[in-house]
């Protein structure tokens, strides 16, 4: 009986990880890495738009047939979406909780410390809000086609062009992709520190990798709406 009582009172591993600052940072880093991997794959697929409607629509059709014949049409995407949603939720919650802990530990603002912060660091919170709102818009625009007035089911290339032929579609997308770049730049560096991958020798390489990847992703994503606006993709 005493043993059972002690066992019931002992904290679980998951609970201990969730309550600790290191655990929260690790969860934030791992969920961020998962989303980064998705963004890289998503960008690679989206760039197929430059090869024409047949290539892009073929790619969209292939995504819905992954796992066939074991998985039915579209099942693979519905298996991936909950995982991504969980990553987004965990990332947002841990970021918010860590921010509150940091402010509670250091209630007074230090001028010199704030001067050393980069623009990306200071805007991570707002960047997260922008990206959350964008995800909702993006789903309504190109997944459910709710806000895409000229969208047609089964025509992803044409739907993408229709969305980027509107000033608001371009503005929302480009703003969000700038936020993605800033988020990736700061987040990759922070994740490396959290997971113990940084050192005096590797700091410069990590910073260069974070800056380079953020720049490539931002330019890659933005190139699509810009190309539609310029008539290079139609």
Image (tube, rainbow, N blue to C red):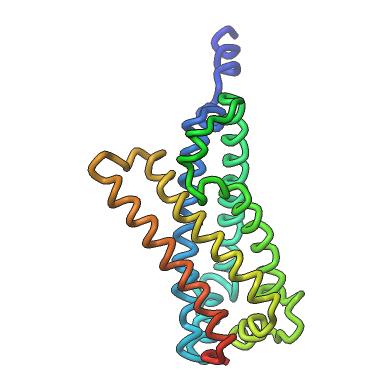
Looking at the image, which residue is at 65% across and 72% down? 171
Give the answer, above or below, for where 141 lies relative to 17.
below
Q: Does 217 sit above or below residue 62? A: above
Q: Give whichever of 79, 162 is nearer the camera.
A: 162
**Number of numbered discs present?**
0
Across and down, in percent, residue 196 comes to 34, 38
| Residue 99, image quadrant | top right
Toward the top, the furthest residue is 2
Rendered-image quadrant of the N terminus: top right
Measuring from the top left, give residue 158's x and y in whole percent: 62, 88
Question: Residue 6 versus residue 202: which sits nearer the camera?
Answer: 202
Image-quadrant location for residue 185 = bottom left
User: Could you tell me which residue is drawn at 47 percent across and 58 percent down?
Assistant: 36
From the viewer's perspective, tell me whether residue 209 is left or right of residue 140: left
Q: Which of the image's four quarters has the C terminus?
A: bottom right
The residue located at (69%, 74%) in the rendering is: 141
Between 226 and 82, the residue placed more toward the observer is 226
Residue 233, horizontal then vertical, whole percent: 54, 89
Q: Residue at x 50, y 56 (%)?
A: 182
Nearest the viewer among 8 and 204 is: 204
Q: In the image, is residue 117 above or below residue 168?
A: above
Q: Is residue 145 above or below residue 217?
A: below
The x, y position of residue 27, in whole percent, is 50, 41
């Amino acid at each position: 009986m005493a043993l059972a009582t002690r066992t019931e009172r002992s904290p679980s591993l998951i609970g201990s990880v969730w309550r600790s600052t290191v655990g929260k940072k690790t969860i934030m880093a791992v969920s961020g890495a998962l989303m980064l991997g998705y963004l890289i794959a998503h960008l690679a697929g989206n760039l197929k738009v430059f090869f024409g409607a047949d290539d892009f629509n073929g790619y969209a059709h292939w995504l819905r047939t992954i796992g066939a014949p074991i998985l039915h049409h579209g099942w693979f995407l519905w298996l991936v979406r909950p995982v991504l949603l969980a990553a987004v939720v965990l990332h947002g919650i841990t970021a918010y909780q860590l921010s509150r802990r940091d402010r509670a530990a250091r209630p007074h603002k230090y001028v010199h410390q704030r001067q050393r912060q980069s623009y990306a660091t200071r805007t991570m919170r707002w960047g997260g809000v922008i990206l959350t709102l964008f995800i909702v818009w993006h789903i309504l625009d190109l997944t459910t086609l709710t806000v895409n007035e000229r969208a047609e089911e089964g025509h992803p290339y044409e739907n993408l062009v229709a969305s980027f032929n509107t000033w608001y579609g371009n503005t929302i997308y480009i703003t969000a992709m700038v936020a993605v770049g800033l988020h990736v730049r700061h987040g990759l560096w922070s994740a490396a520190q959290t997971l113990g991958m940084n050192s005096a020798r590797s700091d410069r390489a990590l910073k260069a990798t974070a800056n380079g990847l953020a720049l490539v992703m931002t330019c890659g994503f933005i190139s699509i709406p810009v190309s539609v606006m310029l008539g290079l993709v139609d």
